[in-house]
Image (cartoon, rainbow, N blue to C red):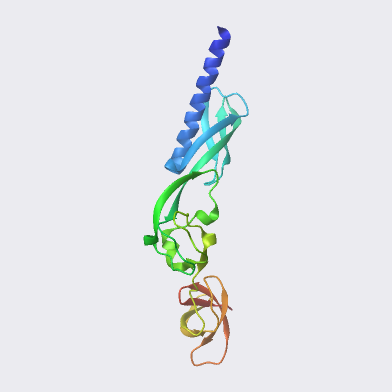
Amino acid sequence: MVLILLIALFNLAFANLEDAIKQELHKKFGDTVRLLKIKPLGQIKDIQDISLDVEYGRFKSIAYVISDEREVKVFLDLLWKVKVYKAKENIPRGSPIDISMFEEDYIWVRTVPSDLRISSEDFPNYVTGTNILKGAYLRKVYLRPIPVVRYGEIVRCMYKEKEILIKFSCKALDTGNIGKVIRVKPEGLEKVLRATITARGEVEVLP
C-alpha cells in the first residue's frame, strides 16, 4: 500500500513538473514548441522557480528548476513547428520565385534546418538554382541569389567618415549581392573605388 502511494505521489509530482515546464515553454515560444519528454536529475517536490535554457529549433534542451532551495537540472526533448512553402507545381531551374508558386504548410521537426527558415519577403531576391518538384518543400539550398548590383549600372554611393556623409553616383564595375565588396567609379572621374553593397542599387565606399 505504501509503495503504491509513493508511486502515485511520484507520478503526480512528475506530471506537475511537466505541466509547469510546458507553461514556461508556451510563454516563451507559444504554440511553436511541443514537449516530448523530460528527465529530471534529482527529486523535485515543490516547484519554486523554472528557468529555461532553450533555443528555437534545438531538440535537446535544459530547464533549471528550483525546489527546496536546490537547483535541479531537467533535460527536455522538444519538437518544433516550422512554416514551410510547398511547391504547387514543378518549378524549372532559373525561375524567379513568387509566393503564388507555393502553399504554406506547417511541419513538426526535432531541429529546424537553417535553409528551411525562409520568409516570403526573401522571394524577390532569389531564382531557383535547380528544378523543384511539385510537393517539395522550398529550401535555400535550392535557390540562387539574384545580384542586387550589376556590372555597368549606375548605383547610389555613400561615403561616411566620422560626422561627414557624402552621397554621389557611381558606375558599378562588378556584379554582386549584399555584403560583397565591388569596384565602382564615380561619374566624371577616372579613379576606381572599392565599396560594399548595402542594398539593391546602393553601395558604401570603403575608406
Position above or below: 42 against 35 = above
* Res. 3 visible in picture: yes
Quarter placement of the C terminus: bottom right
The quadrant of the image that shows the N terminus is top right
From the top left corner, tell me how far across and down residue 167 is, in percent.
46, 81
Look at 56% across and 45% down and name the residue there. 58
Residue 23 at what x, y percent from top left?
Answer: 45, 34
Question: Residue 64's image quarter?
Answer: top right
Q: Residue at x 52, y 62 (%)?
A: 142
- Rendered view: 183 above or below 16: below
Q: Residue at position x 55%, y 92% from top?
A: 190
Along the viewing direction, whichever of 206 and 175 lies nearer the viewer: 175
Residue 41 in which image quadrant: top right
50 or 22, which is in the foreground?
22
Q: Residue furthest left?
A: 100
Measured as percent of width and height from the top left, residue 170 is found at 49, 85
Q: Quadrant of residue 52?
A: top right
Q: Position of residue 3 (x, y in %)?
A: 58, 10
From this viewpoint, is residue 46 visible? Answer: no
Q: Residue furthest right?
A: 41
Q: How many marks?
A: 0
